[in-house]
Amino acid sequence: MSTPATAPAAEPASRASLRKVVTASALGTTVEYYDFTLYATTAALVFDKIFFPDASPLVGTLAAFATYFVGYAARPLGGILFGHFGDRLGRKNVLIITMLMMGLGTFAIGLLPSYDSIGIAAPILLVLIRLIQGLGMGGEYGGGVLMALEYSPRKRQGFFTSLVHIGTPAGVLIPVGLVTALDAALPGGAYDDWAWRLPFLASILLVGVGMWMRFHITESPEFVKMRADREVQSLPVREVLTRRPATVVFSILAKIAESGLFNIYYVVAITYVTTELDRDKTPVLLAVLVACAVECCTLPLFGALSDRIGRRKVYIAGALFQAVLAVPFFLLVETGQFWAYALGMTLGLGVGHAAMYGAQGALFSNLYPVNVRYTGLSVTQQFGATLGGGLSPLIGTALLATAGGHWGWLITYCVGVAIMSALATTRLAAGEARPDTPEPLPTPAPERTATP
């Protein structure tokens, strides 16, 4: 014989479920950015020699960043594909598939033979792996953020979705830390020869933990209610694009600076320091570690602030801060000093980017109703990230090359996208806290078996 749990027990169970969902989503974001950050960092340091050895250093780096962009280019398709299934079948199962695609792709790169071993097949295989990873990454973000948002109390959505976003600087911190440690600990040339593969192979550990956690979470309560009310859309992407075109366009423009400038601060900066300034890579990598560690702490602060004063205010302030920071950032980098690298990157990542990213999850998610939210958020995120983060290493490196290694044109790009995104965000009033949205349903406590 069993008896229902008493009512008060449901609330602790709900909090426990929220903690589990946020942790699983943050870990998924960590795997996501571990993958792309590790590739971007290794592309800036090694891949020109491993996969494009016949090119000059700058051209080889451009080629490596072109394969980096391939992964980004596949993200919008992945967002539409997995957003469709996430809105129709549920968030949880889609997130299991996307983590496998990203994680196994990263592991496979660690096993990939070099150009010297198999010739042109090496870069071709690299591109194919990047395509698969890009598809998976396109579906990962929307589901992870929505699970946290749809479990959260409405007035704290900014805070809890910002906890998921900690996976981004953590996903930078871990691989850059591994690269820095390996480069410092191993004999000269060992990292470039073979040790670069170790962080790729180690990614399988994160994937294993992430898969275990995702198998042990339950479906989003808002999605369960929407499906019970028979409000599932047959073609969510059509609903998003035909009925909310202005929202899609302005949210994509708002996203570009957040994603694009993030990659300027560490991908292009690393390339500039090691290629144009011809300085040692260790200090700049350590500076990235410091900045990412700070951002892990500041993201929830800005997320909580967005709950109090509004998502758009925090997001716009972060964009304008980065516009003002552009010239001082490169003046600091040009000194070649560790303290200057760390200060510039900490201001860029730990303040400017953190303000935008901390408010972003709740801001963009609330632009769309539950029955098309996975698709809408994925379209916003992935098209914006492709035009921003995917292109910025290519644009940044090309602008440096065009200007003979000077950063003048690059400053114009940074300021321009920051102001554009700030202006676009002013049109996203629907993303603020929505009082008409019901609170998530508490997760029922498990039944307790009566003692005979």
Image: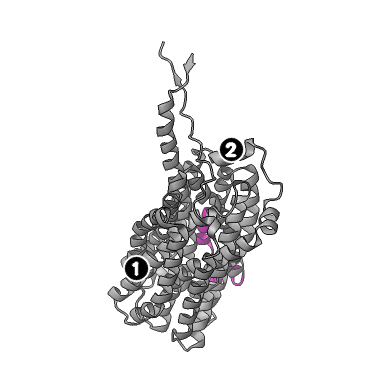
Is residue 384 rendered magenta in the image?
Answer: no
Q: Is residue 113 above or below residue 53?
A: above
Which secondary structure, mark 2?
A: helix
Q: Tag 2: Cα neighbours inside 10 Å, few (<14), some, or many (≥20)?
A: some
Q: Tag 1: Cα neighbours inside 10 Å, few (<14), some, or many (≥20)?
A: many
Question: Which callout, 2 or 1, points at the residue further toward the start of the chain?
Answer: 2
Q: Measured from the top left, where is residue 85 in percent x and y?
A: 64, 47
Which secondary structure, mark 1?
A: helix
Residue located at (57% from left, 73% from top): 66
Residue picked out by circle 2: 224
Question: Which numbered marker is on residue 200?
Answer: none
Is residue 104 rendered magenta in the image?
Answer: yes
Q: Is residue 332 above or below residue 346?
A: below
Furthest toward the bottom, the residue is 404
Q: What secondary structure predominates along the stretch shown in magenta?
A: helix
Q: Measured from the top left, where is residue 369 in percent x and y?
A: 60, 49
* Bounds of the magenta segment: 103-122
Q: CA distance from mark 2 to mark 1?
A: 41 Å
The reply to whether the C-beta atoms of the residues labelled 2 and 1 are less than 8 Å apart is: no
Q: Residue 168 lies in what quarter of the image? A: bottom left
Question: Which numbered marker is on residue 346?
Answer: 1
Q: Nearer the viewer, residue 426 or 328?
A: 426
Q: Nearer the viewer, mark 2 or mark 1?
A: 2
Q: Is residue 187 above or below residue 357?
A: below
Q: Measured from the top left, where is residue 334 in percent x and y?
A: 35, 82
Q: Is residue 371 visible?
A: yes
Q: Residue 306 lies in what quarter of the image? A: bottom left
